[in-house]
Amino acid sequence: MPELAPALLAAYVGLGLLVGFVAGLLGVGGGLIIVPVLIFMLHAQGLAAGMEPQLALGTSLASILFTSLSSVRAHHRHGAVEWSLVRRIAPGIVLGTLAGALLAAQMSALLLKGVFVVFLFYAAIQMWLDFRPAPQRGLPGRAGATLAGGVIGAVSSWVGIGGGTLSVPFMLWHNVALHRAIATSAAIGFPIALAGAAGYAVGGWGLAGLPVGSLGFIYLPALAGIVLGSVLTAPLGARTAHRLPVRPLKRIFALLLITLALRMAWTF
């Protein structure tokens, strides 16, 4: 079974090492790296032809299930999580993410890649400009939070992220302090990952053409390697962040995202 060869597992661990370090260094989720790189790897291996985006997205969201827990615990210990907002927004998050993942399972690979490319450019511009919206209003009520959660969840399911690129600006706009917005976003990432992983697992269940070791659209060998690698290097990235200037590093990461977006736009 070539998809379980040690060299391939080592490549997935290598991807996890990179993702963990960048996440610890810049405080960003790894999905923006995992999804395009995993699509390239699956395509090069000839696995899941025509379904590479779904498999990469499902695997990315499943990995966030594991990596978000330690982040949430750390933020909770510092008392920075707005749990009242998490409770209000979680129903919309779960419904939007689950519906988005089930819909993505039926979408064409070309359309999903197009959505992801557009989002990569958005994330790169946001990071390059270090965009932080000015506070304009208070937090919404349950109906407004449910609607916002549905949108954040659906988009997150289509790009394989824990939602921080969307939820942090949303909370800053609603007058939540930056450190509390980041902490609350980490907590929101878990239901996104849970609902998204479930949606992609169900959406791909029993489909022909998926590689051995797949649970629907979750590729377990890649998941294991990514989680193992990221756990090892996330603390190193966090320590390094205290020694290096963050703004230039964010701009370097923005250039990496633009490079990945261009590569996806012009490849296969």
Image: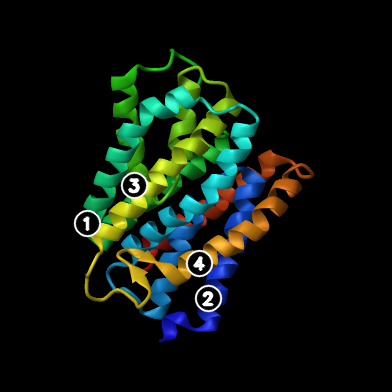
Which image quadrant: the N terminus? bottom left
What amino acid is labelled 2 in the image? Leu
Q: Residue at x 76, y 44 (%)?
A: 244
**Position above or below: 263 against 95:** below
CA distance for labels 3 and 4:
19 Å
Foreground mark, 2 or 3, reads 3
Q: Position of residue 67 (x, y in %)?
A: 54, 51
Mark 2 surroundings: few (<14), some (14-19) or many (≥20) residues within 10 A: some
Foreground mark, 1 or 2, reads 2
**Position above or below: 78 against 195:** above
In the image, taking residue 25 as reference, residue 102 lies left or right, namely left
Residue 9 is tagged as: 2
Residue 224 is tagged as: 4
Secondary element at tag 4? helix
Foreground mark, 1 or 3, reads 3
Q: Earlier in the sequence, mark 1 or mark 2?
A: 2
CA distance for labels 1 and 2:
28 Å
Q: Earlier in the sequence, mark 2 or mark 3?
A: 2
CA distance for labels 1 and 3:
18 Å
**Residue denoted by label 1:** 107
What amino acid is labelled 1 in the image? Met
In the image, taking residue 236 as reference, residue 264 lies left or right, namely left
**Residue denoted by label 3:** 195
In front of the other: 126 or 22: 22
**Residue at the limit of the structure toward the left, as seen here:** 106
Labels 2 & 4 near each other (Cβ < 8 A): yes
CA distance for labels 4 and 1:
26 Å
